[in-house]
Amino acid sequence: MPTVLNKEIVAILNRSLEHGWVMEPEAKRLFQLAGLPVPRFVWARDVSQARAGAAEIGYPLVAKVVSPSVVHKSEVRGVAVGVADDEELGSFFQRMSRLPDFSGILIEEMVTGHELIVGSKADYQFGLVLLLGIGGTAVEVYGDVAIRMAPLTAEDALSMLDGLKGGKLLAGYRGKPGINRQKLVEFLLGFSELLGEISSFVESVDLNPLLCSEQGCVIADARIMLDARFRPEKEKEPNVR
């Protein structure tokens, strides 16, 4: 894990200023640079790049729209899971290309595991806080989350995990394997350390889902919203001579 921001992470954040948020391919690269696990992915700007990336990753795969105007991909049916072949991938690309500010598609390997949500937010009263919960659509139904102030310790991470009502499911239930608790704790500590490095840039981070299994945890979906202070309108200062 980095102890200071490296140049490539700063470059990603700077490139994202004009949009106010970090599009998913850039977010995945940022987390990759920080040593946090992400699926194998390719950002394809045209159909030929998409098919070349698919040949590298292998079918079936996940495809997602990339556009600075589409923050919530599901609202525009911008995610396809289990894309089976070149024809299906090409059809998805053509459909997404009609969306505003279309910037290509993200294609990723398929990953499975228990769906968790990990997030962070700059709280006015408490400063940077981190969240762990049962993820996917269940986060809205059950609201099963644990929150701690940053930076996290290993004890904090374990207590968050133990505090979830659905924690028993994560230990393995009715034949379904559990998750690797140590890997999750390591992930949370790494995430906490990264957030400490970039907290002045960002308003909130959502990883939903974070897919965890017996082997470890992988960031399946990521959204980084930048702090309003770093948006272009706030940066423009008058020239004073």
Image (cartoon, helix red, strand yellow):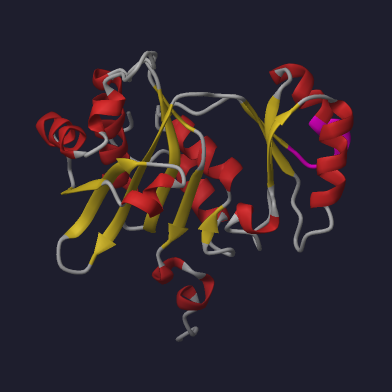
Residue displayed at 24% across by 27% down: 168
Residue 20 is situated, as x and y percent measured from the top left of the image, at 52, 64
**Relative side of 59 to 131, left or right:** right
Q: Per the image, is 70 magenta? A: no
Magenta-highlighted residues: 44-50
Residue 55 is situated, as x and y percent measured from the top left of the image, at 78, 18
Q: Is residue 199 visible?
A: no
Please tell me how many numbered marks the rendered image carries.
Answer: 0
Residue furthest left in the image: 155
> Where's the N terminus, which quadrant?
top left
**Relative side of 173 to 68, left or right:** left
Residue 151, picture quadrant? top left
Q: Per the image, is 45 magenta? A: yes
Residue displayed at 47% across by 80% down: 237
Residue 11 is situated, as x and y percent measured from the top left of the image, at 52, 47
Residue 153 is situated, as x and y percent measured from the top left of the image, at 13, 34
User: Image height check: is 117 above or below 77?
Assistant: above
User: Image height check: is 43 above or below 40?
Assistant: below
Residue displayed at 53% across by 61% down: 17
Front residue (pair 87, 168) = 168
Residue 159, picture quadrant? top left
Q: Is residue 120 visible?
A: yes
Front residue (pair 119, 26) = 119
**Relative side of 227 to 74, left or right:** left
Residue displayed at 23% across by 55% down: 128
User: Image height check: is 229 above or below 165?
Assistant: below
**Relative side of 136 to 127, left or right:** right
